[in-house]
Image (tube, rainbow, N blue to C red):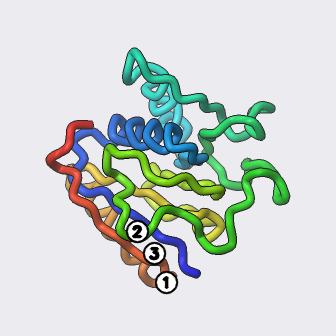
Amino acid sequence: MATRVDFAFGASDRLRMACEVVRKHHAAGRRVVVYTRDMQHLVRFDRLLWGFDATAFVPHVMADDPLAQDTPVLLATSLASLPAAGSSLDAKPDGGGPPAEQEPFSPKPVDTTDSWWLLNLDHDCPPEAPVFGRILEIVSNQEDDRQQARARWRQYHASGHALHAHDVSGRQP
């Protein structure tokens, strides 16, 4: 089964929206890997995730941290640094995730799954996309970000993934 990829277009602040999405999925009981090859970008996201909301707590660590096996949100610059095969990171073979009509970027909680979801903050498609139960992409209104997202959309489509677009331009990050 092809991995479902959800694109959220029109985010006013990509990193802040990413924090909201991670918080929502953590609250719903999902495990999330946040990926980008850019360490500085990942460090900015890490800092924002700790402080974007004074009342929010999203437990997270870098993927190579000794606590990664027991932490629901992992930050990674390489998918090779994720816990080894056979660990709790193994995705469900059926692709998991909520029903197709469930909107992944809505503020409402959705049903939990046993598979890891990938939030891609990189400019390119992740190298190991098919091993995740679901992939989330957040796209800002900046033209370069939109162009890079279009290229990722084409690559995912060519790889046979199930693509879904969501307009989040009217939502607060």
For mark 2, does the 10 Å Cα neighbourhood hold few (<14), some (14 to 19), or many (20 or more) residues? some
Q: Secondary structure at mark 2?
A: helix
Instruction: Tell me what residue is drawn at x 65 percent, y 56 percent.
Output: 114
Q: Which residue is mark 3?
A: 156
Instruction: Tell me what residue is drawn at x 85 percent, y 58 percent.
Output: 86
Q: Which residue is mark 1?
A: 160
Q: Which residue is mark 2?
A: 152
> Taking 60 as reference, is 50 above or below it?
above
Residue type for callout 1: Gly
The percent position of residue 84, horizontal first and vertical second, equals 82, 53
For mark 1, does the 10 Å Cα neighbourhood hold few (<14), some (14 to 19), or many (20 or more) residues? few
Residue type for callout 3: Tyr
Relative to 123, 91 lies left or right: right
Gap in Å between the C-alphas at discs 2 and 3? 6 Å
Between disc 1 and disc 2, the foreground one is 1
The quarter of the rendered structure image containing the N terminus is bottom right
Instruction: Tell me what residue is drawn at x 33 percent, y 40 percent.
Output: 17
Residue type for callout 2: Arg
Corner quadrant of residue 55: top left
Instruction: Tell me what residue is drawn at x 64 percent, y 58 percent.
Output: 115
Gap in Å between the C-alphas at discs 1 and 2? 12 Å
Relative to 86, 91 lies left or right: left
Q: Are marks 2 and 3 in contact (CB under 8 Å)?
A: yes
> Taking 132 as reference, is 64 above or below it?
above
- Residue farthest left in this picture: 170
